[in-house]
Image: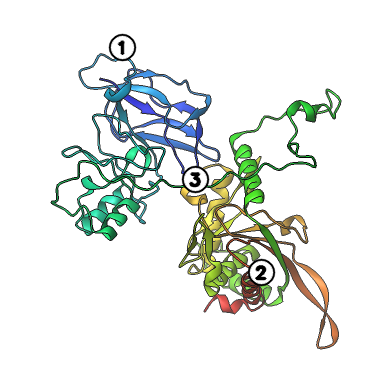
Amino acid sequence: MPINVLMPALSPTMEKGNLAKWLKKEGDAIKSGDVIAEIETDKATMEVEAVDEGVLAKILVAEGTADVPVNELIALIAEEGEDPGSVQAATGGAAKTAPVEPKGTPDENAAPDGAHASYARVDTAPEGAKPGGTAHPAEAGSRVFSSPLARRIAKQGDIDIAGITGSGPRGRVIAKDVQAAIEGGTAKAGAAAPAKAAEAPAVKAPAPAPKPTQAGGAPAGLSLEQVKGFYEKGAYEEVPLDGMRKTIAKRLTEAMQVAPHFYLTVDCELDALMKLRETLNASAGKDKDGKPLFKLSVNDFVIKAMGVALTRVPAANAVWAEDRILRFKHAEVGVAVAIDGGLFTPVIRKADQKTLSAISGEMKDFAARARAKKLKPEEYQGGVTSVSNLGMFGIKHFTAVINPPQSTILAVGAGEKRVVVKDGAPAVVQAMTCTLSCDHRVLDGALGAELISAFKGLIENPMGMLV
């Protein structure tokens, strides 16, 4: 019977994707690991690999097709011995499914070293999670659909993974399922797999945010035709929204509706930082072409200062997770990078531990690949806070919208000469204004003030970042 190829979910938030290009044509032999297609997500173009073998019998979704739902059938692969010209889509319980994976992108439950997901071949499509949040464990003797990290944890904990109920996509066993089994003392290796696992309690979905309304209760949004009605025909050009613009609009609207923002503003003196920056840049070694090995920017210091400040105020190094707060050991700082039509926010992992030169090099690489839309999802997802710097545009002060699931974002204005009072006399200093947007569910006013005060102290006494 043929193998169904489905539109893959290339990120945890992906619901639809554009099938940009087929790299194999009908009749081509397919081997495990072959790149078969390019899929455009809301922010990047990803190559997708096959993890099964056969012949590409039929392409059911043409290249260039937009908004293809995740898990929709896009192609059929004929198995060895099958006539590729006569295969039809398998349906119901007899369907075989060939999972695909993004090239170079770890599974959401991959090991920390970035190991790829691997999938066990199945002879029937897994039933997957039920609406109530439950899934069936694998039947005795069948192969288990599981993530690499789940298998590693199961092996270390002497757990029989076949006896564990999977809560992941299509019933896949993921790391948290194995961890729960270890903590509950169930499914020990060698024990017979239960005929049917006890159903997990239904997970209560978060209530949707209320729709904003005008006075009188009417919806605040205007329809396309209503908006057009305000303007003369021919006075404007209609620009269709691409996937990135749609995602930015959706996520930031939700952020303003769901996350209660409050704002804290400080002025930071830059004289000591600028002197240190000049000294460090002058001390940079040269490469074989005689160019400096690094050139630090003020933004590199800002990223480092936010990373160190978060670890010095650990209660603020956290994100909201519906019924709890997740607090992190290291600082993950996103940095907004403007591109044509939108922005990326690549994340500097463990920013508190990295040197200024390492942060500088990483940001240069991220910025170049962001503008080329070559970032991988794991490079711009997650993070605890972000930095948005508009100082290069001469902006003195602004507030930024938090990027969920992060709990803060720092808006950085331009450095400029200002007159201040020092020791009772006027003095000229170089300073910049920074505003921290805080999610009040995670940070109260005093905690937010402690965080931005720690940041200000590091900016004004930058040697503290180096020790």
Sequence order check, earlier mark of 2 and 3: 3
Which is closer to the viewer, label 1 or label 2?
2
> Which residue in the structure is indicated by mark 1?
85
Which is closer to the viewer, label 2 or label 3?
3
Callout 2 amino acid = Gly
The span from disc 1 to disc 2 (Cα, nearest Å) is: 67 Å
Q: Quadrant of the N terminus?
A: top left
Sequence order check, earlier mark of 1 and 3: 1
Asked which quadrant contains residue 98, the reply is top left
Give x and y (percent) for residue 187.
21, 52
> Which residue in the structure is indicated by mark 3?
205
> Which residue in the structure is indicated by mark 2?
445
Give x and y (percent) for residue 34.
33, 32
Would residue 51 be visible to someone looking at this image?
Answer: yes
Q: What residue lies at 49% left-to-right and 51% top-to-bottom?
A: 379
Give x and y (percent) for residue 283.
57, 73
Q: What residue lies at 63% left-to-right and 72% top-to-bottom?
A: 455
